Image: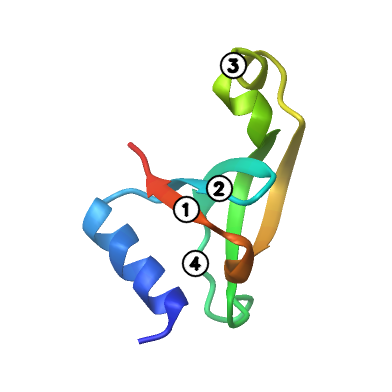
Amino acid sequence: MDRLKEFKKIMDKSETDKVILITNHYRITGYVYECGECNKDNYINLTNATLCLLNDSYSDECDRYTSASYDWLHINLDKIVAFSFIK
């Protein structure tokens, strides 16, 4: 099974589409948007996504100041080092 299918399988078991993704530099929070027509292999589509520098996520800075907000954000699965679904 490919990584995208594994990701969606875990999302289904978690019974939520809200996710935190960790890359080498960012903490990204958003809602997974499933779209068969727009989903490319190896990409996760997020809506209402917020980015925070990873170093700021261990302090109050990330909660007080969001580095960036996006209506839509597409993230390459190869860049994700950790993720967690949250309710």
Indicate whether 38 appears above or below 67: below
- The amino acid type of the residue labelled 4 equals Glu
Tag 4 residue: 34
The numbered mark, 3 or 4, whose residue comes first in the sequence reads: 4
* Label 2 – label 4 distance at C-alpha: 20 Å
The quadrant holding residue 51 is top right
Task: Tell me the SS state at disc 3.
Answer: loop
Q: Mark 3 points at which residue?
A: 59
Is residue 20 depicted above or below 55 in this figure? below
Q: Nearer the viewer, mark 3 or mark 4?
A: 3
Which disc, if any, is residue 82? 1
Mark 3 in CB contact with mark 1 (< 8 angstroms): no
Q: Contact (CB < 8 A) between labels 2 and 1?
A: yes
Is residue 40 rendered to the left or right of residue 1?
Answer: right
Q: Which residue is drawn at 66% across and 24% down?
A: 56
Per the image, the residue denoted by label 2 is 22
Q: What element carries label 2?
A: strand
Give the distance between the C-alpha atoms of the residues marked 2 and 1, in whole angstroms: 5 Å
